[in-house]
Image (spheres, helix red, strand yellow):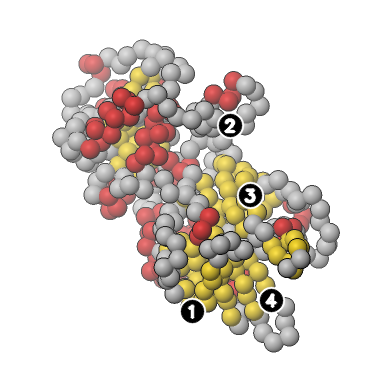
Amino acid sequence: MPGLEVGQVAEILVTIGAGKPGRRGSGYRVTAQTVLTAEHVVRGASTVRVRFDAHQAGEWSADVTGVLEIPEIDVALLTITPTGVGQVVPAQFGLIGERDAVIECSAVGFPLWKLRGDPAGKYRDSAHVVGSGNPLANRREGTLEITVPPPERDTDPDVSPWQGMSGAAVFRNGRIVGIIRKHHRTDGLGRLAASRVDSWKAQLTPSRLQDMIALLPQLEDVIMLSPGNLREVAPVMVQPAAVRADSVAQLLDPQLGVVPFFGRADECAGLRAWCADEHAGKLRIVTGAGGVGKTRLALWLDDALSGRGWECVWVRDGCEADAVTGVYDQARAKYANRGVMSTDSARTGYARAATWLTRSPWRPGQAAMTRFSARTGQKPKRDSASPAAHHRGTH
């Protein structure tokens, strides 16, 4: 899945007016002509300029010709004239939802604490910040709290060392889930607050949402979802909470990817062929003893298909019924019915899967995919599912 592209990370340079100090911020080029940043970064600006690959061989910049300011969520969309410099990978957006989890995420920006000097003068270097999102914090404010490694020094009580980081896109598994909005000094140096994508619909009027979607059509599939449990399904970019490797055994967790994925050429080829076959059944089950690599294989498949004409979703245990309809609607709108649904629980059961797949709107040739893990190593009973209940699955 396409993720954070360093060539699309933007430094926002703002002039306010005669005799007034300028302002800096961070941003991300989400389409060829659109840069995403925080609204307060460009508020009251006389001119705005965005710079890419600063102090690199390919450095270039562009004047902003239009600004869509959305102060309700502290988001701004800047319009620039597309250039032939670099290939732009359109950004994808994702939801986190509210649940007890720790979500690993990352952002690149230009905070004050990266201010440095050399014989040519002062400059701000980039900061690649990797932290953990805490979905249940800051509920009243409606932001995503991100715990990050704190800078070592806070030399100015009137200016945050994180000044300039505002507007940086926050990525989780290749998708933007928010943008850095502010640093609350009372939270300490190791916490930032981000405007979270999954709150935008509730905070904006329909007309304001449509203004955003006009510039970023890819937002529609994320923030205009029909009511239901779809955000609780946990799409592939919002996998279960990152595991902290506090022990050697936890290094084996497949989501950490400590060891490169290899040695499954036949299985990978078989899954690809199955997904490409319009006449294949809907359900595919991968079984095996615990630790054999079922989850890692499914993670590979989701990564191989995401962003390549498939809608890939991880179904949380107990959300199967809502997931079938919700993912079907989403995949039908985006990818002509091609979707991959994955579940990571043997408790879900083959018969249970067969039941909700039989009742679903999916038909053979409309590749939905569900993934099952027989952690006990026991093969499912063949008489526990209807022949019509083939639904593409992994795990």
Give the structural element (helix, strand or loop) at label 1: strand
Q: Residue at x 61, y 79 (%)?
A: 45
Frontmost residue, 32 versus 143: 32
Of discs 3 and 2, which sits in the foreground? 3
Which mark sits nearer the N-terminus, 3 or 1?
1
Give the structural element (helix, strand or loop) at label 3: strand
Quarter occupied by the C terminus = top left
Q: Determine which quarter of the picture holds residue 25.
A: bottom right
| Mark 1 surroundings: few (<14), some (14-19) or many (≥20) residues within 10 A | few
Three-letter code, disc 1: Thr
Which mark sits nearer the N-terminus, 3 or 2?
3
Question: Label 1: which residue?
Answer: 65
Give the structural element (helix, strand or loop) at label 2: loop
Looking at the image, do the residues carrying marks 4 and 2 touch, with CB atoms under 8 Å apart?
no
Question: Label 3: which residue?
Answer: 129
Q: Residue at x 42, y 27 (%)?
A: 262
Three-letter code, disc 4: Gly
Whether 87 is drawn above or below 321: the answer is: below
Residue 18 visible in the shown view: yes
Counting every numbered tag in the picture gives: 4
Three-letter code, disc 3: Val
**In the image: residue 71, left or right of residue 367:** right
* Place of residue 138 in the rendered image (x, y in percent of width and height, measured from the top left): 64, 52
Question: Label 2: which residue?
Answer: 243
Whole-number angstrom distance, CA of label 3 to CA of label 1: 30 Å
Which mark sits nearer the N-terminus, 4 or 3?
4
Whole-number angstrom distance, CA of label 1 to CA of label 4: 18 Å
Question: Label 4: which residue?
Answer: 22
